[in-house]
Amino acid sequence: MLKTFLIFALTISTMTVYGCKKNTTDENNVDNKTVNVDEGNKIKAPDFALLTLDGEKVKLSDYAGKVVILDFWATWCPPCRRGVPDLISIQKEYKDDLVIIGISLDQPSTQKDIQPFIEEFGINYPVVLGNQEVSMAYGNIRAIPTSFVIDREGNIANKFVGLVPKSTLIDAIKPLLKGS
């Protein structure tokens, strides 16, 4: 009994620190740290057209000229759940020049939980249903939360794998918001 409890506790603490890993056969490619994209090596963020729960199409290109945070997450992921209040706060504070887009990687069996989750947390940014295509376009998302900060020109400025403090996200967006 004690051994089972210790294994469970270790698993939960690992998920809380690093994020939730999707099932994969090659977990060595998961990078649980901040990846800064060098200014000289600008990488264009792949455009996408994904649907909200209401069937409304959301495209990344709709937000050209704004700083964007893409947050890959799921309702069943404890670190994702812990990070949502920070994203809500950031969206509220920087609403004129920034948009957060939540890309839910919930499977069909848990998609029914998304709307109640949005309502419970008071999410104030678009939430869309992710798919394999967008996951692959952004480097084959293997752990959630994974967030990308995209500059006003549509280039990936930062990538964060795992839960990061609110201050880290703010430090990443502030230089991109200058001049607004």
Image (cartoon, rainbow, N blue to C red):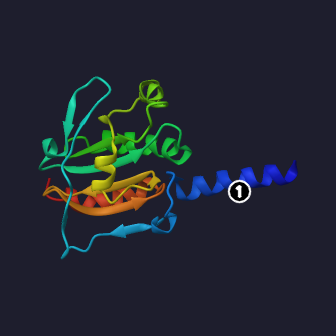
Percent position of residue 78, x then y: 56, 44
Judge the density around disc 1: few (<14), some (14-19), many (≥20) Cα neighbours within 10 Å. few
> Is 25 left, or right, of 57 in this rendering?
right
> Is 133 left, or right, of 117 in this rendering?
left
Percent position of residue 119, x then y: 43, 24
The residue identified by callout 1 is 10
Q: Residue furthest front?
A: 25
Splitting the image into 4 quarters, where does residue 90 fall? top left
Percent position of residue 11, x then y: 67, 54
Q: Which residue lies at the image location 38% right of the left edge and 47% below the top edge?
A: 72
- Considering only vertical position in the picture, is 98 above or below 137? above
Nearest the eye: 82 or 26: 26
Q: Residue furthest bottom?
A: 40
- Considering only vertical position in the picture, is 172 above or below 92? below
> Is 109 left, or right, of 103 in this rendering?
right
> Is 137 left, or right, of 32 in this rendering?
left
Callout 1 amino acid = Leu
Q: Which residue lies at the image location 44% right of the left edge and 36% below the top edge?
A: 107
Q: Residue furthest right?
A: 1
- Considering only vertical position in the picture, is 92 above or below 4? above
Q: Which residue lies at the image location 48% right of the left edge and 27% below the top edge?
A: 113
Percent position of residue 96, x then y: 20, 42
